[in-house]
Amino acid sequence: MDALDLLLNRVSVPRLVAPGPDAGQRELLFRAALRAPDHAQLRPWRFLTVEGEALVQLGELFAQGLLASNPEAEAPALDKARAMPQRAPLLVVVIARLQAHPKVPEQEQLLAAGCAAHGLLLAAHAQGIGAVWRTGELAYNATVAAGLGLTRDERIVGFIYLGTPERELRTAPQLPLDDFVSAWPAG
């Protein structure tokens, strides 16, 4: 796939089924993620893969997180939280590893981890793997973070769901550039 075609046409694929990416495809996904911009070579990211029975366990952790933040959560909301990880055969948790550094503020490190997540999404699209990046309140939930083994200096950047697209990919919208690009100073 041509690089510009990839960049111009990648779309999120929310409906995913098995099979998930194989070992060779996964290696390419993570190699692409590791090419993210990285001021001072801090490599401020790490990844957890979740699949098989672990998806069910993650769903239980999501339900625990929901209950911790909302003790009044009702059964339908808890069931929805339990089902979330099972929307794809493979889920990758992208984690920012924030480190004290005199020239690289935490915000830059968080952005670098976000770029790593985006690199993973692009590599998925290039290989015909469906992918969608999700966050939501559970990405910022202390119970979920603790259950995933995050340290106090780590943050969940997102949950990337990967698998085979259930249906044909939608066409990427063509946004008007003038809505987003302007010269400075204006005038």
Image: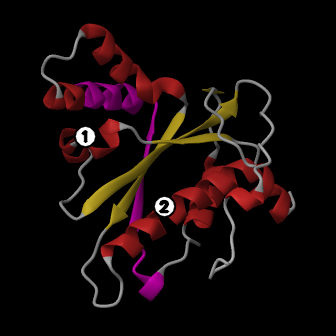
Residue 115 marker? none
| Residue 2 pos. (x, y %) | 87, 61
Left or right: 179 in relation to 53: right
Q: Over which residues does the magenta segment extend?
A: 39-63
For the point 33% across and 32% down, the residue is: 58
For the point 69% across and 57% down, the residue is: 179
Left or right: 60 in relation to 166: left
Q: Quick check: is 186 in the magenta stretch?
A: no
- Report the amino acid beneath label 1: Val
Relative to 154, is 56 above or below?
above
Outermost residue toward the top in this view: 75
Query: Mark 2 falls on what kind of element?
Result: helix
Residue 42 visible in this rendered orientation of the protein: yes
**Residue 89 image-quadrant placement:** top right
| Residue 64 pos. (x, y %) | 20, 27
**Quarter of the image containing the N terminus?**
bottom right
The residue beneath circle 1 is 144
- Report the amino acid beneath label 2: Gly
Query: Mark 1 falls on what kind of element?
Result: helix
Relative to 53, is 162 above or below?
below
User: How far apart are the two marked residues, 2 and 1, measured between alpha carbons?
Assistant: 19 Å
| Residue 154 pos. (x, y %) | 27, 61
For the point 30% across and 57% down, the residue is: 155
Q: Within 10 angstroms of label 2, few (less than 14), some, or many (20 or more) residues?
A: many
Q: Within 10 angstroms of label 1, few (less than 14), some, or many (20 or more) residues?
A: many
